[in-house]
Amino acid sequence: MESPPRELSRLVLYCEEAGLPLFVGCDSNSHHNVWGDKEVRPRGRALLAFLTLSRMQIVNRGSVLTYFTSERQSVIDLTLCSEELFSRITSWEVSLEASLSDHRHILFDLDELFQVNETGYRNSKATRWDLYAEELEGRLVGLPSRYESEADVEMMLNRLNNAIIVSYEASCPIKPRTSSGKTPWWNPHVKSHRKTVKKLFNKAKRTKILNHWEDFKSAQREYKKSHS
């Protein structure tokens, strides 16, 4: 597999050309001491070379392990962002709490970039697609079918993008947000599972005994089921 994947390279290039901020959280499966791993491997070198030539910054700090199993521990989970976001990300850290996978949670604060509607939301499942099609068709009437220059194509793309957004907003209006402030799936049973998983994880990490890892993985699976 390429490092980085072709899709990520294209996304980074698109955002650079369009002047858009980009934030990426990923399991890079790449090893390099620049982001705290003990090893340096070809995939890590290739990824670092790509990031060096792009506007993307590595947010990772320290060398706390992000991937943890009985066979292998490493730092392969990366937080990447474009230059304009870098100063807005603070308090980055790897959570030492047991998660629902072999990867640990990454925690950080991100300063507000965009205005958020605190009073309502759009439910895409409730979109009136017949109205959307009607709205979009009406906004596309009169657009030229031939383009003489790159500037004409760019203008057309902007108009098309705007037509899609406005049509969607018209067919999926904002609904009032109602919330009791409580997380519906959180209960004493789930809380007990979480406590057990954390205890077994710390025990397996400390002893490195295979049976202890198996006990932890079994409890982790039960913890996952309690969320469903």
Image: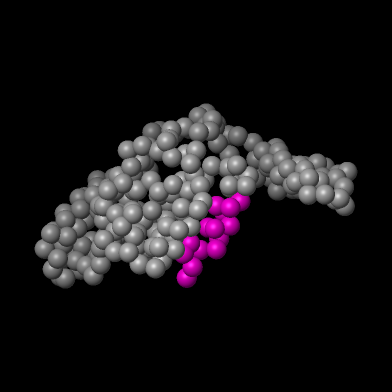
Give the vertical position of 19 relative to 189 (above or below).
above
Secondary structure that dominates the magenta span: helix
Q: Is residue 79 in sight in this rendering?
A: yes
Q: Nearer the viewer, residue 138 or 89?
A: 89
Residue positioned 45% across, 58% down in the render: 49
Give the vertical position of 67 relative to 90 (above or below).
below
Q: Position of residue 171 (x, y in %)?
A: 69, 41
Colouring style = one colour
Is 183 left or right of 139, judged from the image as shown? Answer: left
Q: Nearer the viewer, residue 174 or 52?
A: 52
Q: Position of residue 89 (x, y in %)?
A: 40, 38
Q: Nearer the viewer, residue 85 or 122?
A: 85
Residue positioned 51% across, 47% down in the render: 55
Q: Position of residue 129 (x, y in %)?
A: 70, 48
Q: How many marks?
A: 0
Residue positioned 13% across, 68% down in the render: 209
Q: Residue furthest left?
A: 207
Is 116 left or right of 27, judged from the image as shown? Answer: right
Give the vertical position of 211 relative to 166 (above or below).
below
Is 27 left or right of 10, judged from the image as shown? Answer: left
Residue positioned 23% across, 70% down in the render: 71
Where residue 65 sits, quadrant-wise, is: bottom left
Q: Is residue 186 in sight in this rendering?
A: no
Q: Position of residue 192 (x, y in %)?
A: 21, 50
Q: Nearer the viewer, residue 188 or 25?
A: 25
* Magenta stretch holds residue 175: no
Region of the chain picked out in magenta, as a range = 1-14
